[in-house]
Image (cartoon, grey):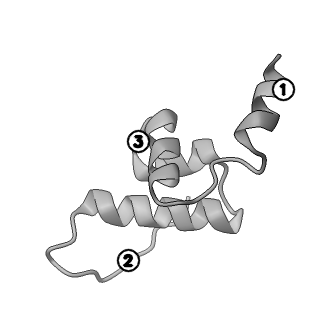
Amino acid sequence: MKTVTVRVPESMPDAEVKLAAAIEAYTRGSATAGRAAEIAELPLQTFILELRRRGKPAYPYTDEEARRELE
């Protein structure tokens, strides 16, 4: 795994930095949702909720399409 040093304001909590990096990696397609959750150090469900809270799609299909697939 690669380690990167990023300078951020002292007031920015580490958890926010990790989450921002994870969301960026996920939306660019360089990390799966599961891997991004690991980067953010969050459970997968929590990461998906964070994506939704920020208006980012958690998967490339609608909720209705997902429901049909799961039936």
Identity, as a three-letter code, of the amino acid under mark 1: Arg
The quadrant the C terminus occupies is top right
Residue occupying image coordinates x 64% and y 64%:
27
Identity, as a three-letter code, of the amino acid under mark 3: Leu
**Vertical relation: 31 (above or below) 17:** above
Q: Which residue is mark 1?
A: 68
- Crowding near pointer 2: few (<14 within 10 Å), some, many (20+)? few
Q: Which mark is residue 21?
A: none
| Residue 53 place in picture, x, y as percent | 44, 53
Between circles 2 and 1, the one closer to the viewer is 1
Asked if labels 3 and 1 touch by Cβ distance under 8 angstroms, the answer is no
| Residue 9 place in picture, x, y as percent | 21, 81
Residue occupying image coordinates x 67% and y 49%:
32
Name the element at disc 2.
loop
Give the spatial CA distance, label 2 vs label 1.
43 Å
Name the element at disc 3.
loop
Q: Which residue is mark 3?
A: 42
Identity, as a three-letter code, of the amino acid under mark 2: Thr
Give the spatial CA distance, label 1 vs label 3.
28 Å
Of residues 17 and 54, which is closer to you in this image? Answer: 54
| Residue 20 place in picture, x, y as percent | 43, 66
- Crowding near pointer 3: few (<14 within 10 Å), some, many (20+)? some
**Vertical relation: 39 (above or below) 9:** above
Q: Which residue is mark 2?
A: 5
Give the spatial CA distance, label 2 vs label 3.
20 Å
Residue occupying image coordinates x 47% and y 60%:
54
Specify which label sits upstream in the sequence, 2 or 3.
2
